[in-house]
Image (tube, rainbow, N blue to C red):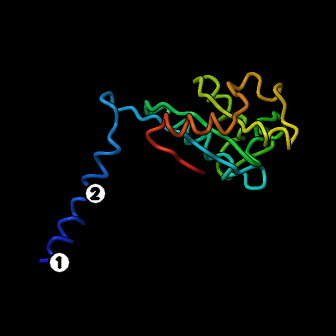
Amino acid sequence: MIRSAFIAKLFSAPLFLGAMFQRSPDGKLKIMMKSAWGSDDPTKAAFPFLHALALTESGHEVQIFLLGEAVSLMRDAVANAVVPVGWPPVSEALAKLVEKKIQIYACGACCRARGVTESDLANKNAKFGSPEIFVGLVEWSDKIITE
C-alpha cells in the first residue's frame, strides 16, 4: 500500500513540474543568461553570447547578466582577443546580439572593480546591472541558464 502510493507520487511529479514550466501561448520563453566566465576560458566565456543568439533565432526572448570576470568582455580589446575553440571571436557574437537588440547587463560593482566604464558598454545594448536588476530578471524569466 505505502509502496504503491509512493510510486504514484513519483510518477505524477514530472507531470506537475512540466506544468510549472510551460511556454507562453505563443511558444516563446523568457530566458535569462548568467555568466561569470572571462578571458581565462575563452570557450566558456563565449557560451552565453552564442547560446543567446541561438535562443533568439529560435524565437525566444533573452537577456544576459554578466558578473565577475565576464564583465571584462564588454571591452572591445578583450572581446576581440577572446577566441573560443571552434568559434569566431566573442566580438562577432556580441555584434550580432547588438543587431538583435538583446539586452546585456554587466554587474556595476564588478565593472568598477575591473575598470569597465560606460564607454565600454556603449553601442553594445549594455547597461550596468545591480542586485535589484538581477532580481528583476530572475522574476521576469521562465528559465535561467547559468554558464
User: Relative to the observer, which residue lies in front, 39 or 33?
Assistant: 33
5 over 64 or under it: above or below: below
What residue appears at the point 16 percent right and 70 percent down from the top-left corner? 5
Give the crowd class for mark 1: few <14, some 14-19, many >=20 residues within 10 Å: few
Q: Is residue 91 left or right of residue 6?
A: right
Q: Quadrant of the N terminus?
A: bottom left
Give the crowd class for mark 2: few <14, some 14-19, many >=20 residues within 10 Å: few
What residue appears at the point 88 percent right and 38 percent down from the top-left corner? 115
Q: Is residue 35 left or right of residue 77?
A: left
What residue appears at the point 61 percent right and 47 percent down from the top-left corner? 47
Which quadrant of the figure has residue 94? top right
Q: Name the residue that disc number 1 marks.
A: 3
Q: Amino acid at mark 2?
A: Pro
User: Relative to the observer, which residue lies in front, 85 or 70?
Assistant: 70
Q: Is residue 102 left or right of residue 36?
A: left
Q: Can you tell which mark lies on residue 82?
A: none
Q: Name the residue that disc number 2 marks.
A: 14
Residues at badges 2 and 1 in contact (C-beta under 8 Å)?
no
Which quadrant of the figure has residue 81? top right
Query: How many discs appear?
Result: 2
Dot in front, 2 or 1: 1
28 over 9 or under it: above or below: above
Q: Amino acid at mark 1?
A: Arg
